[in-house]
Image (cartoon, grey):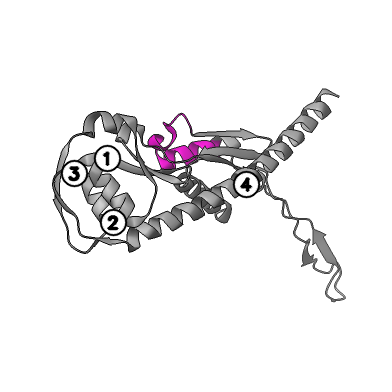
Amino acid sequence: MLAKVLYALTILTLLAGSAFSQDSRNEREENRRRRSVEEAKLRNAVLDANFEDVDFVDAVSFISSGAGVNMIIHPKVLDTMEGEPITLKTSQLSAWNTLNLMLQVYDLKLSFRHGVYVITTPDDYTEDTYFVVYDIRDITFPIHDFPGPEITIQPPSGRGGGMGSPFFEQPQNEEEDTYTAEEIIDIIENATGSEMWDNSNTSINTMGGQLIVTQTEEGHAKVAEIIGMLRANR
């Protein structure tokens, strides 16, 4: 009875997670679309930057206004960069390249959160994370192959000749090598590097033959690639 209850709870949890995953997937798609639109504006806008001891905040405002994109500066960046004079001269360079040149000089990062670009420090740099449920039951559960019987011909027992009677020999089935869910987690973590999982917003767990992964878009791409390789090499 207890096993049935636990099984039912697992199914309900997965169904609820699936519904929530669909909502987050829609939100993720919308965020990706908005990011693509905003990045295209930065790449298509061509600017002549003539910064001569220009305040950092004013330089960012010039680029964001010229490209028509929303951009904010993280408070920690403001603490160190507000009033910092910048000298940078470019001619007919895209706003995207101009901005990235400026950020590289001061070791700053650009992320996209909730529909706007955020200039932040490396320590505070994070990409949006979301969770995906990966079904790995076909990798963790063995697939049995049941081939037909082998047919051999028994030699005739007498001297009268003839082919003899067929003899059916049932082959022995061998289970294919499989992985446990914990082994798959170890493989993914080792292949992607521990730094990809150091962020407190990321995680990888297993439940009911599923992997529940919270990662960035790039992280999910790597996880999916590794699972695909394991599946292909079975």
Instruction: State the SS at label 4.
Output: helix
User: How much space separates mark 1 and mark 4, taking CA atoms?
Assistant: 42 Å
Q: Position of residue 110 (x, y in %)?
A: 34, 44
Mark 3: few/some/many CA within 10 Å (<14, 14-19, 20+): few
Q: Are marks 1 and 4 in contact (CB under 8 Å)?
A: no
User: How much space separates mark 1 and mark 2, taking CA atoms?
Assistant: 16 Å
Q: Which mark is residue 95?
A: 2
Mark 2: few/some/many CA within 10 Å (<14, 14-19, 20+): many
Q: Position of residue 91 (x, y in %)?
A: 17, 62
User: How much space separates mark 3 and mark 4, taking CA atoms?
Assistant: 47 Å
Residue 127, compared with residue 224, is above or below; it is above
Q: Position of residue 190 (x, y in %)?
A: 43, 38
For label 4, the residue is 139
Query: Mark 3 or 4, which is nearer the eye?
Result: 3
Q: Which mark sits nearer the N-terminus, 3 or 2? A: 2
Q: Nearer the viewer, residue 65 or 213?
A: 65
Which residue shows up at 66% across the image and 48% down it? 138
Instruction: State the SS at label 3.
Output: helix
What residue span does the magenta drawing correspond to? Answer: 183-201
Q: Nearer the viewer, residue 51 or 93?
A: 51
For label 3, the residue is 105
Q: Which mark sits nearer the N-terminus, 3 or 4? A: 3
